[in-house]
Image: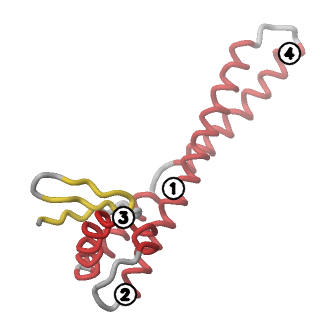
């Protein structure tokens, strides 16, 4: 944890010093996440599922082969489930970005002492290179610190 302290404090302080730039980046990241086309895809899948279910009923009542329609229904249900999971992940990502934004707005000065709880809340991972290290925040923002 001492190593994380050494690498994360300068990155957190850099984020604080460049708070306006970070907030713009966070807003852009939130907008990108929100503009994904998942909602329209769900509407399209639901419409197609309704059409297929009607077709399936017609085929079943006429004793026709309905395997192809049934397979497409299962495929669309799987696709819908994946999109709904993606929407859940999107909501979690937006919440992390909003948490980072709130932290930056409310933090008036640099941090001088290591706070494990704060680091665990903000930092996703630290990557060490030969000439620098990169701190990736849970909000998706990465800060490169050159030693």
Closer to the eye: label 3 or 1: 3
Closer to the eye: label 2 or 1: 2
Closer to the eye: label 2 or 3: 3
Question: Residue 23 appears at what percent x and percent y?
Answer: 33, 76
The residues tagged by marks 4 and 1 sit, at their Cα atoms, a distance apart of 39 Å
Please tell me which of labels 2 and 3 falls first in the chain: 3
The residue singled out by tag 3 in the image is 1
Closer to the eye: label 2 or 4: 2
The residue singled out by tag 1 in the image is 90
Q: In which quarter of the image is residue 122?
A: bottom left
Seen from this angle, which residue lies furthest bottom? 108
Question: Residue 30 appears at what percent x and percent y?
Answer: 42, 65
The residues tagged by marks 3 and 4 sit, at their Cα atoms, a distance apart of 63 Å
Seen from this angle, which residue lies furthest right? 61
Q: Cβ–Cβ below 8 Å for labels 2 and 1?
A: no
The residues tagged by marks 2 and 4 sit, at their Cα atoms, a distance apart of 64 Å
SS under mark 2: loop
Q: Is residue 29 left or right of residue 98?
A: left
SS under mark 1: helix
Q: Is residue 115 left or right of residue 12?
A: right
SS under mark 4: helix
Q: Which mark is residue 60?
A: 4
SS under mark 3: loop
Label 3 CA crowd tier, 10 Å (few <14, some 14–19, many 20+):
few
Q: In this view, does 138 lie to the left or right of 91?
A: left
Question: Residue 14 appears at what percent x and percent y?
Answer: 23, 76
Please tell me which of labels 2 and 4 falls first in the chain: 4
Label 1 CA crowd tier, 10 Å (few <14, some 14–19, many 20+):
some
Quadrant of the rendering where the C terminus is positioned: bottom left
- Above or below for 32 versus 14: above
107, 98: nearer the viewer: 107
Q: Residue 75 carries which label?
A: none
């Amino acid at each position: 944890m001492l190593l994380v302290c050494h690498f994360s404090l300068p990155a957190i302080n850099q984020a604080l010093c460049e708070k306006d730039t970070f907030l713009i980046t966070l807003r852009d990241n939130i907008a990108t996440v929100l503009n994904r086309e998942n909602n329209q895809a769900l509407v399209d899948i639901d419409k197609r599922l309704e059409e297929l279910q009607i077709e399936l009923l017609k085929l079943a009542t006429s004793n026709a082969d309905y395997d192809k329609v049934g397979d497409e229904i299962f495929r669309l249900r799987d696709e819908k489930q994946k999109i709904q999971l993606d929407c859940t992940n999107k909501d979690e990502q937006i919440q992390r970005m909003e948490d980072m934004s709130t932290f930056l707005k409310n933090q008036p000065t640099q941090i001088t002492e290591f706070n494990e709880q704060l680091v665990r809340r903000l930092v996703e991972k630290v990557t060490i290179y030969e000439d620098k290290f990169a701190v990736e925040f849970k909000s998706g923002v990465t800060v490169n610190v050159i030693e």
